[in-house]
Amino acid sequence: MVHDDKGQVMAEDERVEVRVLLTVGDDAELVTLEHSAEAPLRVPAADIARDAGLPAGELPGRRFTAVRRGDGFQDFRLVDDPRV
């Protein structure tokens, strides 16, 4: 069972917003409802870049929506895409 920052239960497969703080090596550090900037979630930057159609070097500072699956996220979509 997954809870948001208000203690409410979040359904798996629910789309939530995440923000990429920075990339470290091959990983991106994400801030989510469950992960603060002090303890970010690390995910492969290539996964986000592939889903969003962006180079990994352009991920830091951007906001995405993603689907929660198990212990991670997938299906990243860029929020406020300036290319559209």
Image: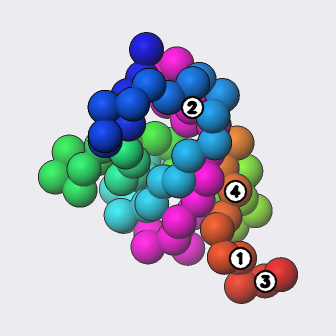
Q: Which residue is pictured at 83% across the width and 81% down the height?
A: 84
Q: Which residue is mark 4?
A: 77
Q: Which mark is residue 47?
A: none
Which is nearer the N-term, disc 3 or disc 4? Answer: 4
Q: Counting residues from the N terminus, which is met first, the one under dot 1 or under dot 2? A: 2
Is 67 rendered above or below residue 48?
above
Q: Are marks 1 and 3 in contact (CB under 8 Å)?
A: yes
Towards the viewer: 16 or 30:
16
Say if residue 41 shows up in the picture: no
Is 43 rendered above or below residue 52? above
* Above/below status of 4 relative to 81: above
Mark 1 belongs to which amino acid? Answer: Asp
Q: Residues within 10 Å of mark 2 (few under 14, many from 20)?
A: some
Extreme residue in the left direction: 38
Residue at figure coordinates x 31%, y 41% from the top left: 5
Distance between the alpha carbons at the discs numbered 1 and 3? 5 Å
Under circle 2, the secondary element is strand
Rounded to the nearest angstrom, the CA distance separating label 1 from label 4 is 9 Å
Residue 81 is tagged as 1
Q: Which mark is residue 68?
A: 2
Residue at 36% across / 64% down in the picture? 22
Q: CA distance from mark 4 to mark 2?
A: 13 Å
Residue that appears at 24% across and 50% down: 36
Give the side of residue 37 with respect to residue 26, left or right. Answer: left
The amino acid type, in three-letter code, at marker 2 is Arg
Work out whether mark 3 precedes mark 2 in sequence or the reverse, and give the earlier one.
2
Say left or right for 42 vs 75: left
Q: Which residues are magenta?
A: 56-73
Q: Residue beneath label 3, please?
A: 83
Q: Secondary structure at mark 4?
A: strand
- Residue 72 place in picture, x, y as percent: 49, 30
